[in-house]
Amino acid sequence: MKNLLFDFIAKYISLTEEEKNAIISTDIFRTVKKGTVLLKEGQKSKESYFVLKGCIRAYYVLDGDEKTTAFYTEMEAFTPPCVINKTPSEYYVACTEDSIITVSDADMEVEINSKFPKFEIMCRLLSEELLAKQRIDFDEFKTSSPEQRYLNLIQKRPDLIQRVPQHQLASYLGIKPQSLSRLRARIVEKRS
């Protein structure tokens, strides 16, 4: 587990053995079962997540229906807005697969950043990358048809097609499961 994290960090900064040991000593690694809810609507949290293995999903429950807004898979970080805003969460975060994640909080991050300032640089770089990616994803979603969204998903995140239940995938694409089935059939027909 820790080597996966250290390999990822190495893309941004180099770590000394002391820094690696400091990370290990924070006890951030968690093995979480499929279906585990990490955050509930209305709950306050200080926790940020980083997926080493598996998949977690962010979703709202509106009028009894789940509306999936994001999937986070290997080597993706996620800090729920309620952590930054210090308000109750407006949505849920749950594991869609058995997962290995890191869980950190602001206090832990402040402590590590004060001991090792280069972590703050890495966090800033990660935040900038994530913000740019989310902006691109949002713009693509708003300006594309459901078929284009699905084709983009096949191109950019094909693993989700096999890993995520169809009803969650349809919700993520902003369509009903029946529409996703018809869309898939239409695409297969076009390609034949």
Image (spheres, grey):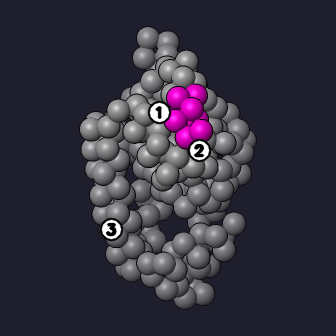
Decide: few, some or many residues near mark 3? Use Cα within 10 Å; few <14, some 14-19, many ≥20.
few
Task: Provide the residue designation for mark 1.
Answer: 172
Q: Which residue is mark 2?
A: 160
Residue 29: numbered disc = none
Residue 63 appears left or right of 191: left
Residue 15 seen in the current view: yes
Q: Which mark is residue 124?
A: 3
Q: Amino acid at mark 2?
A: Leu
Magenta extent:
185-192
Q: Earlier in the sequence, mark 1 or mark 2?
A: 2
Q: Residue furthest top?
A: 63
Q: Is residue 189 above or below residue 56?
A: above
What is the x, y in percent for residue 168? 56, 29
For the point 35% across and 55% down, which residue is it?
133
Sequence order check, earlier mark of 3 and 2: 3
**Residue 34 shown left or right of residue 61 in the figure:** right
Judge whether residue 133 is colored magenta. no
CB contact under 8 Å: marks 3 and 1:
no
User: Distance from label 3 to label 2 (Cα)?
Assistant: 28 Å
Q: Main secondary structure of the magenta part?
A: helix
Which residue appears at 66% of the width and 56% of the height? 53
Asked which quadrant contains residue 191, the reply is top right
| Residue in the picture at 44% in, 68% down | 111
Q: CA distance from mark 3 to mark 1?
A: 28 Å
Residue name at image x 42 percent, y 17 percent: 62
Q: Position of residue 181 (x, y in %)?
A: 58, 24
Can you give x and y, in whole percent of width and height, for residue 6 in the image?
59, 75
Q: Amino acid at mark 3?
A: Arg
Instruction: Tell me, yes or no, whether the highlighted magenta stretch contains residue 186.
Output: yes
Q: Nearer the viewer, residue 136 or 183?
A: 183
Q: Are marks 1 and 2 in contact (CB under 8 Å)?
A: yes
